[in-house]
Amino acid sequence: MTRWGMVIDTDRCTGCEACVVACHEENNIATVGAEEAARDRANHWLRIERYYEGEFPDVKVRFSPVLCQQCGEAPCEPVCPVYATYHTDEGLNAMVYSRCVGTRFCANNCPYTVRFFNWFDPEWDAPLERQLNPDVSVRTAGVMEKCTFCVQRIQDKQRGAKAEERPLEDGEIQPACASACAANVITFGDLDDPESKVTRLAHSRRATHLLHELGTEPAVTYLRGEDWDAPAERPSPEETGGG
Amino acid sequence: MRRRTFLQTSALAAGAALLEACGSEEIVYIESPVARRRGLKGVGIWHTSSCGQCPSGCGTRVRVIDGNAKKVEGIEGHPINHGGLCALGQASLQGLYNPDRITTPLRATGERGSGAFEEIGWDEALEIAAEALARAAATDPGSAGDPGRVGLLGGDGGGLLEPLLKLFSEALGVTAPSYLRSPDQEVERRAAQIALGTTGMPAYDLENADYVLSIGPAFLDRWRSPVYGIWALSQIRGGRRGRRGKLVQAESRMSQTAATADEWLPVRPGSEGVLARAIAGVLLRENLAAGSVEAYRRLFPEPAPDPESAAETCGLRAKQIVRIARELASVEQAVVLGGGSAALHGNGLFNTTAALGLNLLLGSLGRAGGVFEAADFGLAERLSTVEETSLSELTARLAGVETLLILEADPLHNLPGALGWREALAEVDTVIAMSAFWDDTTRQADLVLPVQVDVERFQAGEAPHSVRPVFNLASPVVAAEGDSRHPGDVLLALATALEKTETLPWSRFSDMVEALVREAVDDLPGGSGAPFRGFFENAQDQGGLWANDRTGATPPGPAAAFDGSAEAKSGGAEPTDEFVLTLYESAKFGDGRGANRPWLQELPDTLSTVMWASWGEIATPDAEALGVATGDLLEVSSDFGSVEVAAIVSPAVRPGTLAIPLGLGHDDFGRYAKGRGVNPLDLLGPGTVDGTGVPNLGGTRVRLKRTGRARVALFGRGLRDLEDIPTGWASHEVTPAEPEDKT
């Protein structure tokens, strides 16, 4: 079997947000404008979380890209009254847009707040619509949407491999966020393949999961940051105390 | 039949039908002398191109379906961007398909700036432009000491358009063009000349460095190619097994670079040079210099400040300064970057020279992980060796200019209003703007010549800041919108109309590039002995030509001492009743060029999460003292102007400072940018960076006042205001620990 998963190495993430724009570009995510954005109605399937630690001048900032965690035990799935959100055989937490009736129960139940509701029919001022990706359906008002792990790219590569009668290669599928990143922060692949890069990285000593205590079994693993290899030279308590 | 099997079979059948259909329907979507692009209807093809959103020269590939561009990505293995792109580059297609693009030549019909234009044909437009240029050149072409009546201004992203514009000035016999670039670049170039003895720009071999001390440049935000910086950081942090480097960012503002760094030194704005000198002092006193003490003493003969007094000036801790100096000396390959925000103060030349000078002591000149002369194939110099005119010279003589030709530059938005461009432009008889967008300057033009954007163009240009030569070369991947033309073709058409074909014999930019490559072919990788046509076309197919090895020359070192007393001007303590203003190019808007893309407007700024607005970053204690909360609108005023921004209260801001991003507050620039946010350059006076003539963007004193109003769009606000909800990091036990492959 295949179980799609992702590893995000926060050690290398600079918060540049190229992945966020790439996601919009690939997935036909509409912008909502300044007024509606101020009402919390902007849609970003992928966002960069920013955390502050410490006090000035010893303050530290950490970035973390957050997207749908494609949970193995997804809290969004059982609450959908119409089975619009469901689990695929390949571990994706999928959405059937045409089934969605917009109860928003799924968004309410998602601890990662990565689901977005379309308050309006999307609009693109002509000729911006010429950029739209024909591989991804455009969502209408009243429908939930979220990260799909770029399922259209997965299917495209699967079809290609099938047509050529060969197995998919590890690393062949690159979601738009992963391919945008110069730092290779994001690794995508099959978690059921013990040899895949994503599996190896997911077993790193730096691996964590967001809110793992909730038991959602996310398919996204985060790798924590590391320190410079010179422990003897780190700031002494005396120094950080103002000495 | 099971439902799934039925669906799978149907999908296969549909796929087969599609393939069959594809096989029968070939479409040609560009058929021009410079390119022929064809494909199967409905099938995506990736074409190589080059990113034109900034001058750095990242290689791109563009997915095209039925003649429409759908997605831009980086070229794997390209020596600048290594497969990645920045947010601005990703959003380039919203420039291509911008609803407010200019796609036909226009002549102003009403009062200048009224926005009244009429469409005209290219023949008429070129005739008007040629006539205006000829008239001004005939009145007074300029001579030694007399700049004449023609003004030429280029932008920063021209590639080989830059020398073409110089050649154009030669052909007309008028004063050489000026170029509107990020102002810190000129300071950095001068500082490198003084400290390192380079002639052009310094280039850094960051990916091989063990320790990077960046004094000023936010090189992961928007400085040169941030994509190269981001890739290099990934190499420093994990691309080299067993060798993790360190990044220390000395910058008054918490930029994304400072946030990503292993350590942030929140140096007091304007005192960056003192910090660099103090670090040098430690290296000298403790005999830690691996490089040339003699060369450093030639640059700075006077003794360096001691860490204690420097710490006081810089608002840092003395022990921190000493430790950083010792760390720099403890690794083999340390390098110091200078420029960026440190270059934009009145004493910016000193700050940058002092920072770059540290490389002399560290022995970083011309060795792996160090600093080099930027490498190139010398193509621009083959076209023209004319020295450009400085922007300050053009600004000074603007009142006497009769015809001003502006090629993809927006001085009205990008220069402080106090420099007087708006007033001076009103006095120029004829302003000709070559632009794809209604930027603030184009709005004031008498004649608008619409130009193609990057993916529509034949592109050729050398990456300006690389340690290995990179020549980007790409033919158009989509047909041009409307009646827009290649800016190079327009210049050549003007030259023909002015009967200057002796100097400019080509009718197309691509012909000029081909002739140039033919002439230089033996010096280009793979060019010697190869059949030219195939070589030239292959180069376009792969996005250009580059050398695999570093070829940047080793900087010779300083010839003389730094001549300036700017050290004395370095900041001092923040005033008690005023704030020190820091202006910066944000990753999403740059100098303002990204403001007309809805993706970027709605992109939450990484640190502030602000969308669709300008903001000012203020320290938590300052905000408490003023009674200001995040989102409150602040009136920011200086002796020269005032603007309103939403306050972003942050623990990661140096108290006494206020930082506002550049790039918003356009007069026009289309529906997404017009009137949105503020241009903080309105707060600046006419001051310059000492010894350079470059506008001084740093250190302006401003006063803050609450307006009593509040409004700002923040993304994920609800989530972050509730600190106790279970969001964020949680440790997780997993089966340890297979060998980690981080390459």
Image: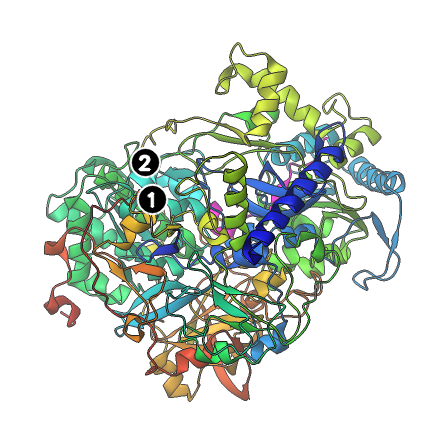
The spot of residue A68 in percent (x, y) is 44, 65
| Viewport quadrant of the N terminus of chain B | bottom right
| Residue at the image position 44 percent from the left and 79 percent from the top | A109
Q: Nearer the viewer, residue B320 or B354?
A: B320
How many numbered marks appear? 2
Cα distance between the residues tagged 2 and 1: 9 Å
Question: Relative to B488, does residue B271 appear above or below in the rendering?
Answer: below
Q: Is residue B35 left or right of residue B598?
A: right
Q: Which residue is mark 1?
A: B562
Q: Amino acid at mark 1?
A: Phe
Badges 2 and 1, same chain: yes
Could you tell me if residue B303 is visible in this image? no
Asked which quadrant contains residue B498, the reply is: top right
The spot of residue B470 in percent (x, y) is 48, 31
Question: Relative to A44, does residue B524 appear above or below in the rendering?
Answer: above
Secondary structure of residue under mark 1: loop
Q: Magenta residues? A: B173-186
Question: Relative to B446, does residue B31 appear above or below in the rendering?
Answer: above
- Residue A10 is marked as none
Q: Amino acid at mark 2?
A: Pro
The spot of residue A178 in percent (x, y) is 44, 51
Marks 2/1 in contact by CB < 8 Å: the verdict is yes
Question: Relative to B238, does residue A6 appear above or below in the rendering?
Answer: below
Q: Which residue is mark 2?
A: B558
Q: Magenta stretch containing residue B183, yes or no?
A: yes
Coloring basis for residues? rainbow
